[in-house]
Amino acid sequence: MTIITISRGAYGGVEPLVDLLARRTGSKTLSREQLLVDTAAEWGASEAQLQSALMHRPGLFEGRGLTKLHFIACAQATMAKAARGEGLVYHGEAGHLLLKGVPHHLRVRVIANQPQRIETVMERCNLSREKAIEYVRTLDQERDKWGRWVHGVDTGDPALFDLVINLERVAVFTAADIILEVAAREFPATPDSRRVLEDLVIASEVRARLGLDSSIPDERMTVAVHDGVVTIRGSSRYLSHLERAVEMARKVAGVVRAEFESS
């Protein structure tokens, strides 16, 4: 079953579209907010820490933000595991980047009805129209800064998506028809694509475990997985740390073999 990620701004109001897609495909749904809850439960991080890691680039006193990057790795691991099985419809920021490289992953950018976003913020946050407009603008700017820091891209760049749909101009039922038609024709799950997803699950799990082990300086380590074989690359100056990283990787479910390459 195709994995569908719907990227939307805060208070984007895409829930009717998400629910319709889930009903018509039998897929489970996952919101950014639920991803925070699930990640916190799995990895022992607080939701506040995860919220900050998935929304804001490092502040003045956070240096290069390694802790935030480690929390992002945890969220990626949790999301990759959720994408297994018979379909997933995710909605929130940056889902299209967290599952990057999975062939049966359809990346959809939804342009929300802006007046509706403003009205929702006014109601939920008890703000005036002027303050609600400013609040939404600030949220969008923070997301853009975060995307450039983590991924080096504008997360809203149309080139990063397979479909861009404007809900101000396209009805929800029509949008669902378009998404499901493209998913079925262009992004079917295959044995090969499922193996790519399994490799992503392993890679993100290893990356997250390394990040949370303070005894292993993983800043300059990279993790690659192909058909269950894990390769951890790093400097020969930290050979003992590479060896420990490999030992940790071998304990992750699904790993066929783990090795390191030093430079």
Image (cartoon, rainbow, N blue to C red):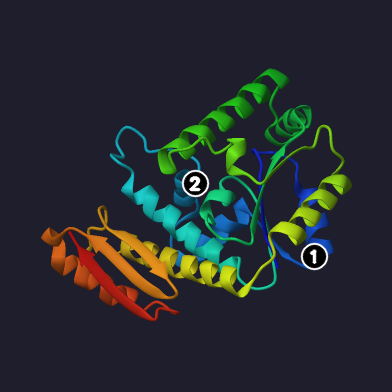
Q: Is residue 178 left or right of residue 140?
A: right
Q: Amino acid at mark 1?
A: Thr
Q: Position of residue 86 (x, y in %)?
A: 69, 72
Marks 1 and 2: CB-CB under 8 Å? no
Q: Secondary structure at mark 2?
A: loop
Q: Nearer the viewer, mark 1 or mark 2?
A: 1
Q: Secondary structure at mark 1?
A: helix
Q: Sequence order check: which comes first, mark 1 or mark 2?
A: 1
Q: Position of residue 153 (x, y in %)?
A: 48, 37
Q: Amino acid at mark 2?
A: Leu
Q: Is residue 244 left or right of residue 105?
A: left
Residue at 59 percent across and 36 percent down: it is 156
Q: Is residue 152 left or right of residue 176?
A: left
- Mark 2: few, some, or many residues within 10 Å (few <14, many ≥20)? many
Residue at 47 percent across and 33 percent down: it is 145
- Label 1, label 2: how many angstroms apart (C-alpha)? 28 Å
Instruction: Report whether residue 9 is seen.
Output: yes
The one of 188 and 108 positioned closer to us in this rendering:
188
The one of 64 and 204 positioned closer to us in this rendering:
204
Instruction: Report whether residue 214 is seen.
Output: no
Quadrant of residue 170 in the image? top right
Quadrant of residue 58 in the image? top left
- Mark 1: few, some, or many residues within 10 Å (few <14, many ≥20)? some
Number of numbered discs overlaid on the protein picture: 2
Residue at 28 percent across and 39 percent down: it is 63
Q: Position of residue 242 (x, y in %)?
A: 21, 67
- Quadrant of the drawing holding the C terminus: bottom left
Quadrant of residue 131 in the image? top right
Residue furthest to the top in view is 130
The residue to which callout 2 is attached is 54
- Quadrant of the drawing holding the N terminus: bottom right
The residue to which callout 1 is attached is 25
